[in-house]
Image (spheres, rainbow, N blue to C red):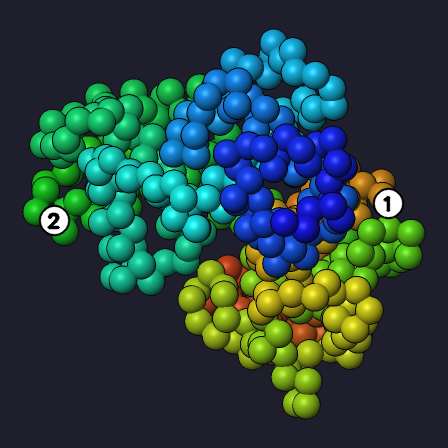
Amino acid sequence: MNLIHYSQQKNLRWLVDSVLAPHIDAYVAYFESGSYPPNSIRRHLACITHLARWMKRRHLVISNINEDTIAEFLDDHLPHCDCLAPVVQVRQDLHAACIHLLRVLRNSGAIPIPVLANDPVDEELRNFDAYMHDAQGLSAKTRQNRLQIVHRFLFARFGKCNIDISLLQPSDVRKFIAEQLAQRGTVSNASRLSSALRAYFRYRTTRGNHLYALTSVISSPAHWSLASLPQSLSADETDRLLKSFSPNLPSFRRGYAMVRCAFDLGLRSSEIAKLALTDIDWINGSITIRHNKSNREDILPLPTTTGQAIMDYLRYERSPTTNAEVFVRLVAPHDIPISPNAVRKVISNAYHRIGITHSRTHALRHTMARRLLEHGSSLKEVADVLRHRSLNTSLIYAKIDSRSLIAVALPWPGSAA
């Protein structure tokens, strides 16, 4: 057991004398395979050393370890811990180390994988999700948003009992919507609620249920089409945003490349996060967008500035990983893909550095549309570049097309013109 590189002798003694001893090599190998730095591995070992001490005092064996055991360790023991120093007592670190330990023990077969109960609500949601995916071809994000709302609705009405759609009453729908809007009474939330519930009731209609009485009580919130102006960045703000990725920032090349993807190509945060190395055709100078809202593939020309930014990140900054995506995590494990939220956070932090108070990552997409219009592109061309299915989606940009609006503006009554 070669742990001297990671742990001090005093801590190592508690591990080699504990019931965790046979599994420590696998635990270390798990982190090494994820390219965790040595200091991080030492920290995790120190955390499970504390767990090992507690298990020895409680006379627990490996088969006793599960989520309930970890919860007892963190909730009951940690607040009143009287273990002799040195022990880690930071709950967040201990929780992370213990979760990794459970994963290692289950991967090796030392403890069983928990069997999830067949919850009626979960079963209903799986069927609804399959319908949205197979029959409607909806994206994972859209399906996830609807499933979250429908889960709250069904659980509020049926709990863990069997689902009987015939028992649903219009009052159940009204009550649920009212409770949800009381927590967050925004127009966007009201739209999400009505859309998700209607979609679910339509699905149940395909299964033979007659739910007109339920759908009729769902009112759509007032939302005037094209009422707002798309928020975009000025030329000065764009220039300052791109220059804000200075070398003193962690992984500044990654952040700069992400912003260029949004600004030059109009990519959404989810599309940037899922962009794969194989999606870039360096020879022909093109990029394929596979994971978009419409579940189709789109091929776009790769601008030189964007390609150079991605190339610099890949050559000088990207961590060694088996991850197929272009952009990877800053910290181990690098093999786990980043989420769209990671992209949004990079852009949001850049906004704040230059004094922009909002965090709307879509503003870069709007900025690209405005630039195209200012340089003479038509709305049809904007729609093609932004990959809108319908031209109506791009009509909002007509309100910021100053060049065309000036041409059609009528003289003010009584003016010299």
Residue furthest bottom as drawn: 283
**296 lies left or right of 20:** left
Q: Which residue is mark 2?
A: 207
**Among the 4 quarters of the image, the one containing residue 411:** bottom right
Identity of the residue drawn at 29% across and 38% down? 116
**116 lies left or right of 278:** left
Pick the front one: 291 or 33: 33
Q: What x and y, as percent, mark residue 382?
A: 61, 69
> What is the distance, in whole Å, between disc 1 and disc 2 at their CAs?
53 Å
Q: Secondary structure at mark 2?
A: loop
Q: Amino acid at mark 2?
A: Arg
Pick the front one: 262 or 93: 93
Q: Are marks 1 and 2 in contact (CB under 8 Å)?
A: no
Nearest to N terminus: mark 1 or mark 2? 2
- Residue 354 is labelled as 1
Q: Amino acid at mark 1?
A: Ile
Q: Alpha-carbon neighbours of circle 2 within 10 Å: few (<14), some, or many (≥20)?
A: few
Q: Compared to 49, does 381 lie above or below? A: below
Q: Alpha-carbon neighbours of circle 1 within 10 Å: few (<14), some, or many (≥20)?
A: some
Identity of the residue drawn at 22% across and 21% down? 171
Q: What x and y, as percent, mark residue 249?
A: 86, 51
**120 lies left or right of 394:** left
Q: Compared to 330, does 296 lie above or below? A: below
Q: What x and y, as percent, mark residue 200?
A: 25, 43
Identity of the residue drawn at 38% across and 41% down? 111
Identity of the residue drawn at 70% across and 24% down? 87
Question: How many numbered badges does the structure rendering display?
Answer: 2
Pick the front one: 130 or 338: 338
Q: Secondary structure at mark 1?
A: loop
The C terminus lies in quadrant: bottom right
Residue 332 visible within the image: no
**Among the 4 quarters of the image, the one containing residue 402:** bottom right
